[in-house]
Amino acid sequence: MSDLFEKGELKISIKEGKICLLYDGLGGDVEVKIEIDYFLDKLKEAIPGKIDDTIIDILKAALKVA
């Protein structure tokens, strides 16, 4: 199983307000789309401390403009 994963490629893009992850592997493709705000909120929760909260908030604002 690990050989299949190691020979694949992960592509990351941002489209229509979502983070799109596309894994292109030997056994096929898997695509996952996650709302940017949801992902960044979960990332903020996962990182201890408060400094990252400010950085992530700035990133969220920048991605809404882009």
Image (spheres, grey):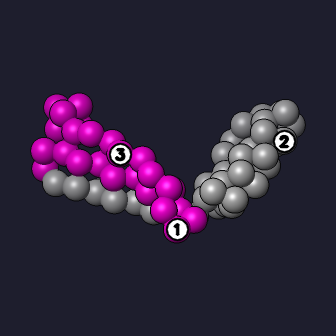
16 w.r.t. 58: above or below: below
Query: Residue 65 in the image: x percent, y percent?
Result: 69, 59
| Dot label at residue 64 | none
Q: Identify whether 26 is placed above or below 51.
A: below
Instruction: Please tell me which residue is depicted at 33% across the width and 52% down the height of the picture.
Output: 22
Residue numbers of the magenta segment? 1-27
Tell me the tag on residue 11. 3
Does residue 28 appear in this view? yes
Q: Earlier in the sequence, mark 1 or mark 3?
A: 3
- Amino acid at the residue labelled 1: Glu
**Is 23 placed left or right of 28 in the picture?**
right
Q: Residues within 10 Å of mark 2 (few under 14, many from 20)?
A: few
Q: Which residue reaches farthest bottom?
A: 16
Quadrant holding the C terminus: bottom right
Residue designated by label 2? 54
Q: Which residue lies furthest to the left in this view?
A: 26
| Secondary structure of residue under mark 3 | strand
The residues tagged by marks 1 and 2 sit, at their Cα atoms, a distance apart of 24 Å
Identify residue for label 1.
16
- How many residues crowd around disc 3 within 10 Å: few (fewer than 14), some, or many (20 or more)? few
Question: Horizontal placement of 43 versus 11: left or right?
Answer: right
**Is 23 part of what is drawn in magenta?**
yes
Q: Which is in the foreground here, disc 1 or disc 3?
A: 1
Residue at 29% x, 48% y is: 23
